[in-house]
Amino acid sequence: MSEMPKIDTSPKSGKDEKARNGARPPHKFEPVPAPFDPPTPGHYTYQAIDRAFKANMARLTNGISPAGLLEIQVQWLGHLLMSPGKQLELIEKAQRKLMRMMCHAMYASSAEGPCIEPLPTDKRFASPGWQKWPFNMIYQSFLLNQQWWHNATTGIDGISDADEKVISFIVRQILDHTAPSNFIATNPDILKTTIEQGGANLLVGLEHFIEDFERTLAGKKPFGTENFQVGRDVAITPGKVVYRNHLIELIQYSPTTDDVYSEPILIVPAWIMKYYILDLSPHNSLVKYLVDQGHTVFMVSWRNPTSEDRNLGMEDYRQMGIMDAIDAISAIIPDQKIHSVGYCLGGTLLSIAASAMARDGDNRLASMTHLATQVDFTEAGELMLFISESEVSYLESMMWDQGFLDGYQMAGAFQILRSNDLIWSRLTKEYLLGERQEMNDLMAWNADLTRMPYRMHSEYLRGLFLDNDLAAGRYMADGRPVNLADIRVPIFSVGTVRDHVAPWRSVYKLTVHPATEVTFVLTSGGHNAGIVSEPGHPHRSYQISTKKIGGRYIDPEVWEQETPMQDGSWWPAWQKWLAGYSTDKVPARKPGNATAEYPALCDAPGTYVLQS
């Protein structure tokens, strides 16, 4: 048996000297180090078995923890069983809905309309065929059933709001899977097409399924994406790669005007996406728009990590991503402050970097723009359905095994959030109706998936989503905490009305934290389409107002009611804001600065964006 470690009790101070002379020193607790307790034989082997098992299970369940879902379901059922009043209410509601449906069926010919209307966002039953018997009875029965299940999963005493949203989401996924619109016999449009074409639509749909299945097995992109090649059809704004490290390529775009604003613009997209969502086709490229308005634009293009990059963390992304890009721009265009722009998670990381820069006295930023960006994750929307200790631990096992989170696994989570639009309606159209969905540049970009390193994604989920460290002032950058309140540069923040990834009310929380002027914009559209909202795009509108330094806080509901609506794209309003915080114009700059050891390395879009 090993001996206990010896503790040095020799006196080290004047008080200890008094102790040797008979005076009693003040009591000072000195904990005795606990003896080393070695793990049981095979401990790490057992852990490896658990992780390997969970990793393989996660691939089958698309990263969703069965244990976490089971825990929520048992909790819901237990609280429901302990609520006899709620049970009686549900029985009464079921009886009323049944009677309502029976009465409507009896007097359907004279009824003015359906007994229940779909939600405004539900387009599954919009075609005229659904208003004919028996399909009108089928879909209205489904909607009444769906409404009953909503009542059954909400308003139960003892269940938190977060758990209530999860169980409602689970039930909604089951109902969406079994909706009458998904089956030949109960969908009038599919049934009509099948009869008219003699089943040819089903054969064509089978061909589509086989082709998609083969593409998936081969790791190829979806059908139609070949018409949107990077560097040929999209991401074609002229420019040069002027800096490259292991994590990023920095692109500087060529000017199209004789004079440019003095302050350059740095755009930091999220590494969940390829950067060219902001440089799609020429008509809807935000990069081209800014360049044509006389701005010098730099873009961060992230490397697509592999398993060798598993240990890259959030601090690596801050240092090698944002800070290295700022250093390069400061060398290429010396003595000029920088307008910084962050999209989605790129904006969150930009906020961390800006807070650290303010803390350290680095004043190289002129302004900061957030595009669909969250810094406070207390109300982070439906993505929180996948963020719990059980889910994160389960996901970490899968990432630990392969070294990264695969883009297909992340895309699956986003698709589930809008399963009606992104899964079932597409499958119905392509495999049952035999009609290929027309591909566009935004859809092709969305299919160009990326990976995320194990360590970074784990730190991101835990530090931001689970613990909300950034908003609480606990987030560490360079070994010290950062505080959003330290940011003093003016901020322009954009939220989108139909954003499932970064809900606009969560984005709006940015108006609370920094002690600076914040201009907030709420625009129509979703997380991607609301940002790619070029001038001339039909059916676009936005609201905009500015909270001055020291201005009173207005809650989002009141803000939405009081702020006037404006038609068109928000891009011109942002460009006017940028120009207002810029100084005089200077002669246009060519990409790179060979004198400062930043020569042009290659043409845009560079090499990292082409990595698959």
Image (tube, rainbow, N blue to C red):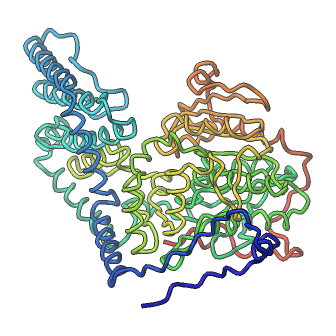
Which of 369 and 333 lies nearest the eye of the viewer?
A: 369
Indicate the quadrant where residue 76 lies: top left
x and y percentages locating residue 146 in the rendered image? 23, 31
- Quarter occupied by the N terminus: bottom left
Horizontal arrangement in the rendering, residue 61 relative to residue 139 (left or right): right
Which of 22 and 590 lies nearest the eye of the viewer?
A: 22
Looking at the image, which residue is at 71% across and 60% down?
Answer: 480
Q: Is residue 603 above or below residue 105?
A: below
x and y percentages locating residue 169 in the rendered image? 32, 41
Looking at the image, which residue is at 67% across and 35% down?
Answer: 511
Q: Is residue 101 visible?
A: yes
Which of 47 and 399 lies nearest the eye of the viewer?
A: 47
Looking at the image, which residue is at 52% across and 43% down?
Answer: 502
Furthest-bottom residue in view?
1
x and y percentages locating residue 347 in the rendered image? 64, 51
x and y percentages locating residue 460 in the rendered image? 54, 58
Horizontal arrangement in the rendering, residue 150 relative to residue 441 (left or right): left
Q: How many marks?
A: 0
Horizontal arrangement in the rendering, residue 113 relative to residue 408 (left or right): left
Q: Is residue 178 above or below residue 546?
A: below
Looking at the image, which residue is at 31% across and 57% down?
Answer: 65
Furthest-front residue in view?
22
Q: Is residue 536 above or below residue 456?
A: above
Q: Is residue 605 visible?
A: no
Q: Is residue 364 above or below residue 517?
A: below
